[in-house]
Image: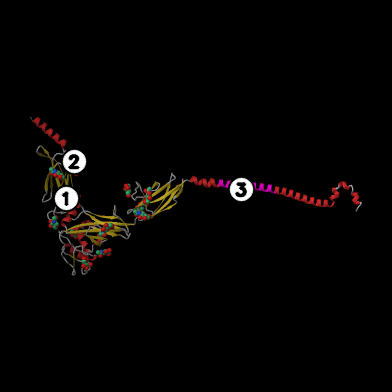
């Protein structure tokens, strides 16, 4: 009998083991007291059976609730009103039960811890050109959007239970502006190192009552005494000429700047104490502290830097095939710089989001670019330079021309042409001389012939004339025989 029971138990445990579930619980905290917190239980490997989720927190008064559902995810949202709960760390435990033929059998449990905080959570964020700054650097002379990003549940709380929310913005302890949208646009125009940014979010759950302030303009007491006396109590007015002002969005000026000091001191004494800017800022005072307000204090030390700009790529961009590309890249901006170069075949339009796996580091505002292109084509050199504030992508188009075409022209064609010219000159020269000598011979012959002929005719004529004179007798050689007869006559 006992044997059977153990067997039964073992088999039950075996079944349970097979079906054992795992659950984890998360929350969307931390959140300021007054907010709602949502807890999420997730069963990872459930088998579509009905599950019972029982939620408990360890706050006083305690919250608890149970849900039966067939889904593997169950959410539980709890509100912690400011009137009932204090800031602190709390735990929520979830018990998971599974249905075994009408019986809820405990499967597993898990828990999550969360913090209810006295002041608002969230972060101070900076963005420039609609892009979130990934670091503490901002570009000079470009508007910086500062904004406080609160968790959803705190925004919901403020909407539900705050008639007005004002954010006071301080830069280097000077009140710059107060806004109702948690944001500030500001342009830094100097490169003089760091700036200490503070945002003070003040939400009033009811219309704000006037708050007593003391200003630096009341000079009868030292600032030190003013500080100590006013920190202790809200309503004390230790100086003879106290001025009244309210923490409303209505013209808070640098005169009422002390408001900020004490608010800050009261709400986050320990967080700001170490900041050197804190001591600079500490000179006066008031304490607008009470349960009617919800505060958020955010601070950041930022650095202003010059973006990478005026990129100038110089050098030859018409290259003979086989020649090395030698370019010089010059730019301005705040070091250190990171750069890389990409070589693309053909025309390439930069998108601006080109990236390299590895980038060279430099503090110099120039670098040389030497590259060998194996192909003879058009290429685009894409130069990516970035510093801590911006990234700039520029390009240069490189044209490579075939060396051989030009070599034939200059090295072969020209000499060949000149050789041909020389040959032609020589040939023509010889031909000319030959022609000329032939011509002169011919002329000489001709002249000679003609002269000879002329001379001949002339001499002939002469002779003829002479002969004419004597020719009859001479002609009559036969009658010459009768010359004796003429002689005899003369
Ligand atoms: C409880 O949740 C954690 C993760 O949040 C997990 O590592 C752990 O195994 C869970 N415990 C049980 C009993 O499921
Ligand atoms: C289970 O949860 C879902 C969503 O949370 C809900 O729509 C559904 O009605 C629940 N089922 C039961 C039986 O409660
Ligand atoms: C709650 O706040 C305390 C003190 O700031 C911190 O040590 C703890 O880690 C926080 N707990 C959670 C769950 O964030
Ligand atoms: C709003 O805040 C006031 C003051 O803390 C509190 O009395 C009131 O209960 C809050 N209302 C809600 C809805 O949380
Ligand atoms: C801040 O600048 C952004 C864009 O640059 C603009 O949308 C926003 O309205 C500005 N806010 C204020 C308060 O001027
Ligand atoms: C404050 O603003 C109000 C109107 O909003 C104006 O009437 C008043 O003169 C201002 N005070 C100062 C000191 O600027
Ligand atoms: C406060 O002083 C700073 C610098 O002195 C100035 O830039 C700023 O505009 C002033 N703010 C107000 C609200 O007068
Ligand atoms: C803030 O710190 C000062 C000394 O640094 C101390 O006198 C004061 O009591 C503190 N205030 C609070 C609210 O803790
Ligand atoms: C990159 O630098 C050029 C000048 O070299 C400038 O015209 C351009 O606007 C810069 N681009 C970016 C995204 O800053
Ligand atoms: C680059 O841009 C110009 C003008 O926008 C366009 O005509 C050209 O086709 C583009 N080239 C490439 C390779 O996309
Ligand atoms: C770069 O931007 C273009 C459009 O501008 C987009 O098509 C491309 O996917 C982006 N590339 C990277 C690596 O983000
Ligand atoms: C650039 O300068 C900084 C500070 O002078 C130095 O720490 C860093 O090593 C330098 N980087 C390079 C690549 O020279």
Between circles 3 and 2, the one closer to the viewer is: 3
Q: Is mark 2 within 8 Å of ligand 1?
A: no
Q: Which mark is residue 339?
A: none
Q: Nearer the viewer, residue 148 or 110?
A: 148
What residue is disc 2 on?
Answer: 44
What residue is disc 3 on?
Answer: 425
Give ligand 5's quarter of the image.
bottom left
Q: Earlier in the sequence, mark 1 or mark 3?
A: 1
Q: For label 3, count other residues whose C-alpha is less than 10 Å away and answer few (under 14), some (14-19) or many (20+).
A: few
Q: Earlier in the sequence, mark 3 or mark 2?
A: 2
- Dot 3 falls on a residue whose secondary structure is helix
Q: Which residues are magenta?
A: 415-440
Determine the CA span between mark 3 and mark 2.
101 Å
- Judged by its main secondary structure, the magenta piece is helix
Q: Is mark 1 within 8 Å of ligand 3?
A: no
What residue is disc 1 on?
Answer: 37
Q: Position of residue 144 (x, y in %)?
A: 29, 57
Q: For label 2, count other residues whose C-alpha is less than 10 Å away and answer few (under 14), some (14-19) or many (20+).
A: few
The reply to whether the C-beta atoms of the residues labelled 3 and 2 are less than 8 Å apart is: no
Q: Is residue 77 left or right of residue 140?
A: left
**Residue at the location (14% across, 45% down)?**
93
């Amino acid at each position: 009998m006992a044997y059977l029971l153990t067997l039964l138990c073992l088999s039950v445990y075996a079944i349970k083991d097979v079906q054992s579930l795992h659950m984890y619980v998360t929350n969307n905290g931390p959140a300021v007291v007054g907010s709602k917190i949502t807890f999420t239980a997730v069963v990872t490997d459930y088998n579509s059976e009905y599950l019972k989720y029982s939620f408990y927190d360890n706050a006083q008064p305690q919250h608890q609730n149970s849900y039966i559902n067939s889904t593997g995810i169950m959410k539980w949202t709890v509100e912690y009103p400011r009137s009932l709960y204090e800031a602190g760390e709390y735990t929520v435990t979830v018990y998971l039960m599974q249905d075994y033929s009408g019986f809820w059998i405990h499967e597993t449990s898990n828990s999550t811890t969360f913090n209810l905080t006295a002041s608002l959570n969230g972060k101070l964020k900076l963005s420039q050109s609609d892009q979130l700054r990934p670091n503490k650097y901002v570009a000079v002379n470009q508007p910086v959007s500062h904004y406080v990003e609160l968790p959803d549940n705190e925004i919901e709380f403020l909407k539900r239970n705050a008639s007005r929310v004002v954010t006071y913005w301080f830069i280097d302890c000077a009140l710059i502006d107060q806004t109702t949208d948690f944001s500030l646009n500001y342009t830094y125009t100097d490169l003089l190192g760091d700036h200490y940014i503070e945002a003070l979010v003040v939400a009033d759950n009811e219309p704000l009552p006037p708050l007593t302030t003391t200003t630096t303009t009341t000079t009868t007491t030292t600032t030190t005494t003013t500080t100590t006396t006013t920190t202790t109590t809200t309503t004390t007015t230790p100086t003879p000429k106290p001025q009244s002002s309210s923490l409303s969005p209505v013209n808070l000026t640098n005169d009422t700047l002390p408001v900020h000091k004490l608010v800050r001191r009261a709400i986050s004494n320990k967080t700001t104490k170490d900041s050197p800017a804190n001591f600079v800022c500490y000179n006066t005072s008031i304490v607008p502290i009470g349960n009617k307000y919800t505060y958020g204090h955010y601070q950041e030390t930022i650095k202003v830097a010059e973006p990478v700009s005026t990129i100038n790529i110089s050098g030859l961009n018409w290259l003979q095939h086989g020649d090395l590309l030698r370019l010089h890249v010059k730019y301005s901006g705040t070091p250190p710089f990171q750069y890389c170069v990409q070589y693309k075949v053909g025309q390439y339009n930069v998108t601006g989001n080109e990236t390299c796996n590895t980038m060279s580091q430099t503090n110099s505002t120039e670098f040389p670019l030497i590259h060998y292109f194996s192909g003879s084509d058009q290429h685009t050199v894409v130069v990516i330079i970035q510093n801590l504030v911006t990234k700039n992508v520029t390009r240069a188009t490189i044209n490579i021309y075939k060396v051989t075409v030009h070599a034939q022209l200059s090295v072969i064609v020209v000499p060949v042409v000149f050789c041909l010219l020389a040959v032609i000159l020589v040939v023509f020269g010889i031909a000319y001389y030959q022609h000329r000598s032939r011509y002169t011979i011919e002329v000489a012959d001709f002249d000679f012939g003609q002269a000879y002929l002329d001379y001949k005719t002339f001499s002939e004529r002469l002779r003829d004339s002479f002969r004419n004179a004597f020719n009859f007798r001479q002609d009559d050689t036969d009658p010459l025989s009768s010359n004796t007869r003429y002689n005899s006559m003369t």
